[in-house]
Amino acid sequence: MFLCNTLKREKQTEQSHLVFKMQQSATKKKADLKVIILGDTSVGKTSLIQRYLNGVFTGDTISTIGASFFLKQWGPYNVAIWDTAGEERYSGLSSFYCRGASAAILAYDISQGKSLRALRERYLQLLDASEPNCLVVVVGTKKDIITSSSREIPSSAGEILALELNEKKGRPTGSFNEKPFFETSAKSGENVQKVFDFILNTCLPLNDEETAKRSLRQTMGIDLENKLQTQNESTKKCC
């Protein structure tokens, strides 16, 4: 037990140093867009980001201490993605990191009703520190583990919250091509890319050439995914 606790503390200390270094690097390259992700502890915020940035899912991520900073290149733009701690004792820090955010992801666990309540009770007030017209995207996580009996939060609840918050930020429902709400799985990757594509396409304009390139890459990705799915189905039939 002592050894386990010691290793855990060492990992947390190492993560704290890494966070500090990433915060320092944030000042070296100016971001064109700041995206903040908020939500209760263990809802899968870090896993969501890791799936998007690296295409991986580990399932054993360490709880974020303070905040972690990631920089993503999107066309000609630099996008800063801030992963914040979910523990209540870090709420003050989360408010600090919300400053200057032009987009916010509010994440909750579909199988945990308390995680959506936590968004309303603890995290909505943090958005006051974000930009006046900050885009708010509500994201339900861990869709892969949900069955009809284990789902504690209906999709409509997350959707209503998303529309409500964007109305307050001066972004009426009619201003979106699609609703700012997604249910995702970091494990399977379902809808993770869509969350960030929605944010970037809404907040950052691309010229026609860049848009065409992104469209081609997305089409190739979809074709490859369909091909792999067809191969898997064929393999199952053979077995």
Image: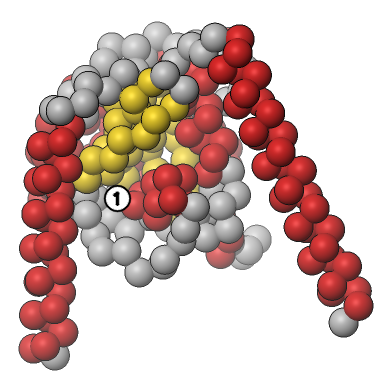
Q: Is residue 101 above or below residue 183?
A: above
Q: Residue at x 13, y 78 (%)?
A: 7
Q: Is residue 171 visible?
A: yes
Badge 1 element: loop
Q: Residue at x 48, y 11 (%)?
A: 205
Q: Is residue 180 left or right of residue 233?
A: left
Residue 19 at x, y percent in the picture:
15, 48
Q: Is residue 163 left or right of residue 232?
A: left
Q: Residue at x 91, y 74 (%)?
A: 237
Residue 36 at x, y percent in the picture:
30, 33
Residue 193 at x, y percent in the picture:
54, 40
What kind of colouring is applied to the model shown?
Answer: secondary structure
Q: Is residue 152 visible?
A: no
Residue wearing tag 1? 40
Q: Residue at x 73, y 48 (%)?
A: 224
Residue 221 at x, y percent in the picture:
67, 42
Q: Is residue 123 above or below residue 203?
A: below
Locate residue 39: give its quadrant: top left
Q: Is residue 126 above or below residue 67?
A: above
Type of residue at label 1? Answer: Asp
The N terminus sits in image quarter: bottom left
The C terminus sits in image quarter: bottom right
